[in-house]
Amino acid sequence: MDELSDSHPISGPNGRAAAPPAAKGVGLRIGQRVHAVGNPRRIGTVRYVGAVEGYAGEWVGVDWDDGEGKHDGSLGGIQYFAARGERSGSFVRPKNLSTGISFLEALHRRYRGNSTKEEEDEMYVFSTSQKHVSIQLVGKNKIQEKLNHFKELLGASVSYLGVSSAETSNEINAIVPNLEELDLTGNLLSRWQDIGTLCEALPSLKILNLTNNLMDCEIPKLLSLVSIRVLVLNNCGITWNQVEKFKESLPAIEELHLMANNLSMIGPTSSSYAQGFDTLRILNLEENCIKSWDEILKLSYLRSLEQLHLNRNRLKHISYPLDHQRPELPSACDMQDTVIRPFENLQCLLLGSNEIDDLASIDSLNLFPRLMDIRLSENPIVDPSKGGLPRFVLIARLAKIKMLNGSEVSQRERKESEIRYVRLVMAKMQSDDLEDLRHLHPRFAELKALHGIEYERPSSGIAGAQKMSSGLISVTLKCIGASMGEKQPLAKKLPPTTTVGKLKVLCESFFKLKDIRLRLYIQEEGLPLPLLLEDDMTAIVDLGVGTGTTVLVDEEG
């Protein structure tokens, strides 16, 4: 490709950009989406069309989506345009850029042309979890006959084919009148009018994926979106204000995906709470820049919302609004005698890869009325290297959770976790203030009673050696390794801060074990299976070892 670069870009004269000339000569306009000829995945936006000082002919300044350009829009000391990144811009000859093809052209190319294996592999739609799911017409050998009759198509993908425009509504409807699912990922679409035309032409369309299409800011009233149930707008440059503008055009929307749009605020235009979206069950806001939980609280009265995906944002704290006031509802849905609770139907909350680091955030999850599925992985509060909570503590603290970090919480695991947690708190109570611990562990008394675990708090006035010994944990050590021989169990008193690694060394000494790599397990009454003590650097008290615990000493392998 003929492409200009400047290895040392500098500011333009007086800091002012050169005014771009009209783009009539090459048929390109500023802001137009284009892709490199022969590579529809290399997509960018036209930012300049015209002459470049020192080079003959006309050039197009392109700001590439993938950031792989040559400069920031400046060349030879002249700033021709402002690129998003320091090296995301380049100058390209017009002949090396494509302005794309129409929707029906892409459809014919994908389904009737000699498609490559790679193109056939791209015939998919996105599932709720954003995984690729093959659509009905993948596998040309099986459905070649159907491909000759586009009217039978129910699902289609024309991803990364350079679609930049749509035919008239009547032309599209005459070819694919029954289309229900359409994937337009990675094309050159930007005008909402084209999206409206497509939806008007496809009255049965329920699933529409516009991922990686940079959409215009101006949104006309799109009455033709009435049939859409799932709308995917990932990485489309969408703001929440734009979402507010087209929400009335989506009366049947059930899933709305807004990943990677650089959203930092939920900014409803009509009130302090987001309203409308009466049928919305799933809202995906992953990979954005939301820092404040107050922004998320603006979504708390979306009454049908069941799943809220917030992975990979910048949230540091979460809470449940106990002192909430009922928002003013439009008269059509105002029910004076109905108590409306925040997040009243929310069942799934994904918070992975944020910055949550406080216990209050964890405990607040118990206040959500129907919450059962939580993701907290990759937050400081659950990071072992930062003293985060292990899984068993999370399960014990979260009373209603049935799914944690993508794994089911069985009844057996819940019982084991709650017993270990009670033992952990009891061990710490021996040296810490009881009231403070009850404040830090709200479910302790409830779980202690539920599982019938007895605890005797040391009496006051203990002095000297008696006081020191009262802080020790009484455990039973029992050898079970095949090569260890028969050894009598030993009762020992250990400091709660003893690490797993230190306990292994002590066991080698107590039982005179040589050249054997040890593995330690907890065995307690009420726990169906022994639990492995994995981290040598962790204190035994933090793993649920308390007075009365039996530690099984086994060998690796």
Image (cartoon, rainbow, N blue to C red):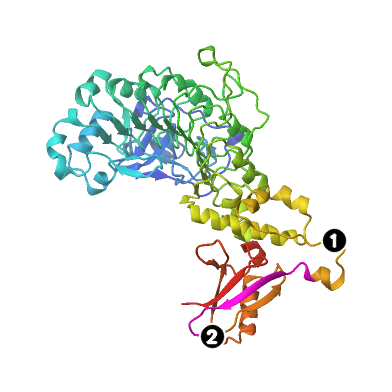
Nearer to us in this view, 196 or 344:
344
Q: In this rendering, is residue 221 above or below 294?
A: above
Pointer 2 local density, CA inside 10 Å: few below 14, some 14–19, many at least 20? few
**Residue on which the image places disc 1:** 460
Along the viewing direction, whichever of 140 and 106 lies nearer the viewer: 140
Residue 307 percent across, percent down from the top left: 48, 37
> Label 2 sits on what residue type?
Glu
Q: Is residue 540 above or below residue 335?
A: below
Q: Is residue 515 above or below residue 377?
A: below
Asked whether residue 470 is drawn in magenta, I would say yes
Circle 2 sits in a helix, a strand or a loop, which is it? loop
Tell whether 446 sits left or right of 410: right
Q: In which quarter of the image is residue 13?
A: top right
**Location of residue 158 by image quarter:** top left
Q: In which quarter of the image is residue 4?
A: top left
Q: Name the residue under label 2.
A: 486
Name the residue rendered at 46%, 51% in the picture: 408
Direction from residue 254 to residue 171 in the image, left or right:
left
379 with respect to 134 (left or right): right
Q: Residue at x 61, y 83 (%)?
A: 508
Q: Is residue 425 visible?
A: yes
The location of residue 463, given as percent across then percent down, is 87, 68
Residue span colored magenta: 469-485
Q: Where is residue 507 in the image (x, y as percent from the top left)?
A: 62, 80
Which residue is more in the foreground, 192 or 28?
Answer: 192
Q: What residue type is labelled 1?
A: Ser
User: Secondary structure beneath disc 1?
Assistant: loop
Residue 16 shown in magenta: no
Instruction: Compare marks 2 and 1 and give the one earlier in the sequence.
Output: 1
